[in-house]
Amino acid sequence: MNVMRLSRLNAFQTGAAYVLLALIFRCCSFFPSLIDHDESTYLVIANELLKGRMYWIDVFDTKPIGIFLLYAGFIKIAGHSIILIRLLTALWVGLTAWLIWDVQRKWMPDGPGPWLSGVFYLAMISLFTFYGV
């Protein structure tokens, strides 16, 4: 088997493992209708942006616009289903862990460092508080 092809397969398997781990870590967060004030704010502002409102003019929060644009994309894909939005969030977190692994793998090609970097990211972002959010 071609080394490049094997490398791509391993990278895909690693990405799938991170996504699966993110889904497992965050599965308890899929069902409550409300978790905290921040999540509600993200969803309300993202929904207003989708209606054509302007951030920092019509709606205001102290966070950078990126989180609201991300949630607006999730609402576009999943509609107003809380479970699907949280599922997309878990997928996003898993893919981010995969990106961290890939960057670390380029810096440190040998040893467990890249894999652990992604796992530690998932643990910190998913398990640090109530329902992993």
Image (cartoon, helix red, strand yellow):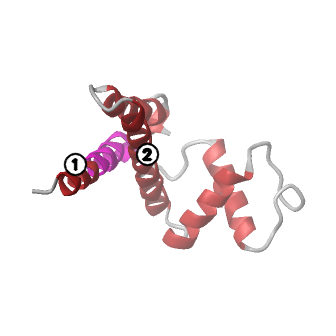
Q: Residue at x 51, y 71 (%)?
A: 77
- The verdict on residue 27 being magenta is yes
| Image location of residue 79, percent across then percent down | 53, 72
The magenta-colored residue range is 14-29
Q: Mark 2 is on which residue type? A: Leu
Label 1 neighbour load within 10 Å: few <14, some 14-19, many 20+: few
Q: Quadrant of the N terminus?
A: bottom left
- The verdict on residue 133 being magenta is no
Q: Which residue is mark 1?
A: 10
- On screen, residue 17 versus residue 34, left or right, reads left
- On screen, residue 9 versus residue 35, left or right, reads left
Kindly indicate the quadrant of the structure image that contains residue 115: top left
Q: Which residue is mark 2?
A: 99
Q: Residue at x 83, y 65 (%)?
A: 54
Mark 1: secondary structure: helix
Q: Residue at x 79, y 47 (%)?
A: 61
| Image location of residue 127, percent across then percent down | 42, 31
| Image location of residue 122, percent across then percent down | 41, 36
Dominant SS in magenta: helix
Q: Residue at x 87, y 62 (%)?
A: 58
Label 2 neighbour load within 10 Å: few <14, some 14-19, many 20+: some
| Image location of residue 16, percent across then percent down | 28, 52
CA separation in Å, label 1 and label 2: 14 Å
Q: Mark 1 is on which residue type? A: Asn
4 or 81: which is nearer to us?
A: 4
Q: Are marks 1 and 2 in contact (CB under 8 Å)?
A: no
Residue ranking furthest to the right: 57
16 above or below 48?
above
